[in-house]
Amino acid sequence: MSHEAISVFDMLKIGVGPSSSHTLGPWRATEQFLLQLKNDNQLQDVKKIVVKLYGSLAKTGKGHGTDVAILMGLLGEDPVTTDTSQINFKIDKIKSTKKLLLGNHHEIDFVYDDEMIFLKNESLPAHPNAMTLEAVFSPLSSGEGQGVRSTYYSIGGGFVQKEGEQQSNEKQSVQLKFPINTADELLNYCKTNNATIAEIVLQNELSWRSEMETKNGILNIWQTMMECMYRGCNASGILPGGLDVVRRAAEMNKKLLKEISYNDLNSWTHAVKSVSKNFSDTLNWVSCFALAVNEENASFGRVVTAPTNGAAGVVPAVLMYYHLLAGGDKEEDIIKFICTASEIGSLFKKGATISAAMGGCQAEIGVSSAMAAGALTACMGGTPQQSLQAAEIAMEHHLGMTCDPIGGLVQIPCIERNTMGAAKALVASQLALQNDSAQMKVSLDEVIKTMWETALDMNTKYKETADGGLATNVPIGLAEC
């Protein structure tokens, strides 16, 4: 049976907010298009670029920063390395000058209102998140009006597929030592090899790179998560977009730390470890960590998809809880947590979806909660079977969750939903650790299948369109932001 080879670094990608499917995916698609022009020696011949957005990308594209991401991609900027503090300046410059430095090399005219086209009433059949990029060449090359056109689908979590091609990822040609499509296959590998989920994952990662490179990459992912939480816990003010949402993480952080001072990430984490660990404060810290990430995400900050940007706060919040408040302070603890979380996330991508435009918020917050629950269970001494049970419990209680962002922004209810996903992950882990896994009635594979069937049955207006739910019933969402 064929399998999709998904690496840890596919499921957890460093990028820029606010959305993996609406921001990171279109950014990566634009990079692919730009690379195509460069490889074909056509970049200098481009006279005009036209962007067409369809379906969910059109309906909530402005609120999710799709246009911003595409323009940054056309400039040749990379979401992993770009200076996020300069994004607004660069976008404003394009709009005011009506000029765009394509690939940071070739200047063309670009009139935003004419050449960034939001086709809100049109959809393409392959996926709700569709975009077409067209480069029109100058008369010096192929003639006036001729050019190249490519259509891309942002299929969730920053994954991109070009129309007419199979999964555009060279990793798919890799034969893994343990090819996995289902949770049952994963569990069998763990049993027959007397291995943890993380150990199976690390063996598979050897198909791409050395174990040391994988571990260093994972620790870099964790460092990015911690830096994101630190920034979010120390940034106040109003989130951009027009909803006037007040950032809350900084105030929570201040109240929880009381009078303890710090001056950098390291001293901040020591301060958090030194304060009360009663039940109420623990929940407050988990909420604070999740809020911090998603407030950064809403502000075009640097985050890690886990598995998406909209759900980026759940896994870091639970991992930070484990790291600072539950004794998981060794590097091997972090590696075990992230390896386990990524593998559980990949099961949902293979068996269902991690795109809210395809499956509603169950595909984002639900999956992230399952990832965090399974990973925490493994790190707290649970068996692979208990880890998968924890993931099942977490998703079972997110089934049917709709995606209804007010104003098309990844703010209400998205930010608070990350706190709830993290809290559910903690409860699911505790339930799994206290239960006899042999008596479980619902398997992870069964809940993944159910999630996908639920996604197919769900009304389209509840799939990241801002056409239903809170997006239409809350007055502040009635005007486009």
Image (spheres, rainbow, N blue to C red):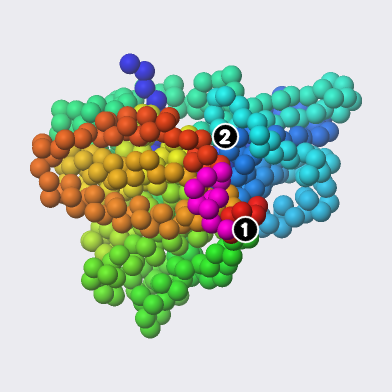
Q: Residue at x 86, y 28 (%)?
A: 138
- Of residues 200 and 30, which is closer to you in this image? 30
Q: Give the range drawn in magenta.
A: 466-475
Is 332 contained in the magenta span? no
Type of the residue with mark 2:
Asn
Using the image, tell me which numbered label, if any, was put on residue 342. none
* Residue 77 visible to the viewer: no
Residue position for label 2: 129
- For label 2, the SS is strand
Q: Residue at x 22, y 33 (%)?
A: 443
- Rendering coords of residue 375 (x, y %): 27, 46
Type of the residue with mark 1:
Gly
Tell me the crowding category of disc 1: few under 14, some 14 to 19, or many 20 or more residues within 10 angstroms, Cα based.
many
| Disc 2/disc 1 C-alpha distance (Å) | 21 Å
- Of residues 479 and 142, which is closer to you in this image? 479
- Please state if 389 lies on the left or on the right of 355 as rendered: left
Q: Quadrant of the C terminus?
A: bottom right
Residue position for label 1: 241
